[in-house]
Amino acid sequence: MRLLPKEVESLWTLFTAPTIWAAHFLACYAAVAIYCEKAGAEDFTFAELRLALVLITILALAGIVLSAWLAWRQWGFGSGDPPHHAPTREDRLLFQGFATLLLSGLSFVAVLFVAVPLVVIEACQP
Amino acid sequence: MTDRSKRKRTGLLLTSSALVLAGCTGRQSALDPAGQEAAEVYHLFAVMVIGGGIIWLAVIGLLLHACRGQRRAWSENEASRLIAWGGVAFPVVVLFALLVYAVWLMPTIRPWVARAVPEPTLIEVTGEQFWWRVRYPAEDGMAGFETANELRLPIGERVAFSLSAADVIHSFWIPSLGGKMDMIPGRTNVLSLQATKTGVYHAPCAEFCGTSHAYMTFSVVVMGQDAYDDWRRKQASGNQPGGSEGERLFAYHGCAGCHSVRGTTPIAGLGPDLTYFADRETVGAGALRNTRENVERFIRDPSSVKPGSQMPAFDMVPHGDIAAIAEFLTGLR
């Protein structure tokens, strides 16, 4: 038996990557906002906060890559061309796999876009 | 089309483009930068316009190509490749590059006081309906002083502004130098700028603040370091010619209850400070040119020039007295 079943008959897998993006977005913005609001009250520096967010970003990207790989597998590693619009179970699975793969790509880029300011921001603005 | 109407059309086109392009220069244009931050913003603008123009041309080119009658249609494979590269890969890379560029520019467009070493002079500017209160701090043995509706800045030196508002939200913007930053009641925002060209620039209030919002402007004079130091010394000393009839009437009719003229009248802080008033370009924070006739007109009925102005009309004061007060004010230099 596989650890991760090849055919997941649930819509939830479709939302995995966008959910990771949303959680990462919230984590980054909320962490910086709270840190800057309480500036000076914490035991760690802004550089440490930045490092923690970079680690969270790497975790998020890894999660999205995993979701994309599962989707790619479900899509049959690109063996069939879209559109998968026949009213069969097989086509439904392939369609879901393909859609999940595209959403994973979008989420990957979105997480990178959200993370760009982390590279530049050095301190809280007074 | 006849030759005549062709000529007329060309003339019209030339005139209108000249008028449009005239907006690109001058003393209130972000496209004619005279400060470091404005230059960065201008650079960003130029990159965006040129890049956007090239992409627009490419898209229109593709559109024309698609509309042209063709002998052979593109195969599905070729079309998919075009969509994958032109519709997915290209926008992702270009948008990523633009985002990195814009975010990387941010510290130069908005330099924080904490980063600037040595710490710059912090000039307090307060937005009030409908004028600007400006306070220079004590520095280098010179006393601090208050002035209004005019900023003087030294060339090549970083200056920071501590911005607040007394009544409603205003916004501080000197397009030629950089900015802008909102002024919010109950809060202090900090903006720092560095002028790189001498000259006189124009700065409007950039947030609608009431009936005379459009008449709420100030002038910015960027001067050489020596001239700037002389100006500060003169302002700090506040020596003015005293003893004139106009000065007496200025106090007698109650002007001095709201406006101060350092060195002659007691300090009053309700209305704009009028020390060295004659050095300013305008009357009523940019409402009128600074001439004696306009000063008289403003004193007689400020609301006719600046609707909603907090200063009451003084049309009950005899003509001769208003003329003497205007004479006094336009002599303060």
Image: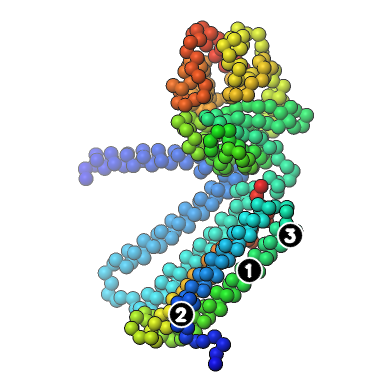
Where is residue B224? Give x, y as percent. 66, 33
Query: In the displayed structure, does residue B234 sit left or right of residue B14?
Result: right
Q: Tell me, for residue A56, which label it has, or none.
A: 1
> Where does residue B125 sit, x and y in percent of width and height?
62, 34
What amino acid type should be assigned to the residue bearing mark 1? Ile
At horizontal 70% and vertical 40% (from top left) the residue drawn is B120
Which residue bears the numbered disc 2? Answer: A10
Q: How far from the left and from the top, in percent, is residue B115? A: 70, 49
Q: Is residue B204 above or below residue A86?
A: above
Closer-to-camera residue (B154/B11):
B154
Report the Cα–Cα distance between label 2 and label 1.
27 Å
Query: What residue is shown with label 3?
Result: A44
Which element type, helix, strand or loop, lies under badge 2?
Answer: loop
Marks 3 and 2, how far apart in space? 42 Å
Q: At 73% from the left edge and 30% from the top edge, which residue is drawn?
A: B138
Q: Is residue A12 left or right of residue B111?
A: left
Q: Chain of mark 3?
A: A
Q: Chain of mark 2?
A: A
Report the residue at 32% width, 64% height from top: B64
